[in-house]
Image (cartoon, helix red, strand yellow):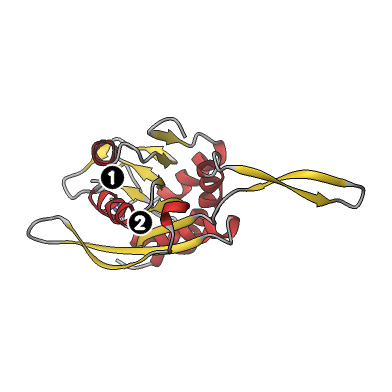
Amino acid sequence: MGQHLTIVDHPLVKHKLTLMRKVDTSTASFRQLLREISLLLAYEVTRDLELTSVTIQTPLQPMEAPILEGKKLALVSILRAGNGLLDGILELIPAARVGFVGMYRDPETLQPVEYYSKLPNLLEERMTIVVDPMLATGNSSVAAIDLVKKKGAKNIIFLCLLAAPEGVARMKEAHPDVPIVTAALDECLNDHGYIVPGLGDAGDRIFGTK
Ligand code: URA
């Protein structure tokens, strides 16, 4: 993946995202759309996975056929909204190893504080896809990637649904080696740190909380 930011420019992705943005889209539809869109994003994010070949036997003859090389890849979900992206990706890559990172924002310093993490082993040998639907300020994404790097990950991609220019800039400064894949780049953040026009609070919309 050559460039730092890839916007997945596919009509199905755009259409589904429009439905997700609408204020009157129900929790059930939002969740279903996120699942569908995450399959399309997973397709794009895994485009550069390395292949090797194996000899197999078809009903007609032996052949050298391509197969994914190396250790199973790792998916790391930033709790809790990351789990909404995770489910669809796991449908496409069922053997992936899965890790979780939980962060909250310290009310005084406004910096992310880790409260939970559980990561797969041998991250240094796996492609690691860190997922969070919203790249807003970038603070939690940067902190989660700091953590997976500390655990050895070297080949990392960040996958989100919506990105704000502020978050992209922050990631580029902190982790220039980590490409970002997103369905759309929105205008900016508002005073409350929400992406505009955005889709609201992704976690609340996925889980039906307020
Ligand atoms: N997190 C969200 O869920 N939504 C935003 O707009 C920004 C951060």
Residue 124 relative to residue 170: left or right: right
Under 8 Å from ligand 1: the CB of mark 2? yes
Q: Which quarter of the figure is the C terminus placed in?
A: bottom left
Q: Residue at x 80, y 51 (%)?
A: 56
Q: Is residue 12 above or below residue 59?
A: above
Q: Determine crowd level at label 2: few under 14, some 14-19, many 20+ residues with C-alpha closer than 10 A.
A: many
Dot 2 amino acid type: Ala
Under 8 Å from ligand 1: the CB of mark 1? yes
Residue 39 seen in render:
yes
Q: Secondary structure at mark 2?
A: helix
- The x and y percentages for residue 10 are 54, 36
Residue 49 relative to residue 147: left or right: right
Kindly indicate whether the residue at mark 2 contacts the one at mark 1 (C-beta within 8 angstroms).
Answer: no
Using the numbered discs, state the Cα–Cα distance from disc 1 to disc 2 in whole angstroms.
Answer: 10 Å
- The x and y percentages for residue 139 are 22, 50
Q: Earlier in the sequence, mark 1 or mark 2?
A: 1
- The x and y percentages for residue 134 are 34, 49
Residue at the outermost top position: 3
Dot 1 amino acid type: Ile
Q: Quadrant of residue 2?
A: top left
Q: Residue at x 25, y 53 (%)?
A: 143
Q: Is residue 115 above or below residue 37?
A: below
Residue 169 relative to residue 36: left or right: left
Per the image, the residue denoted by label 1 is 195
Residue at the outermost left position: 108
Residue 85 seen in render:
no
Total numbered circles: 2
Q: Quadrant of residue 48?
A: top right
Q: Secondary structure at mark 1?
A: strand
Per the image, the residue denoted by label 2 is 202
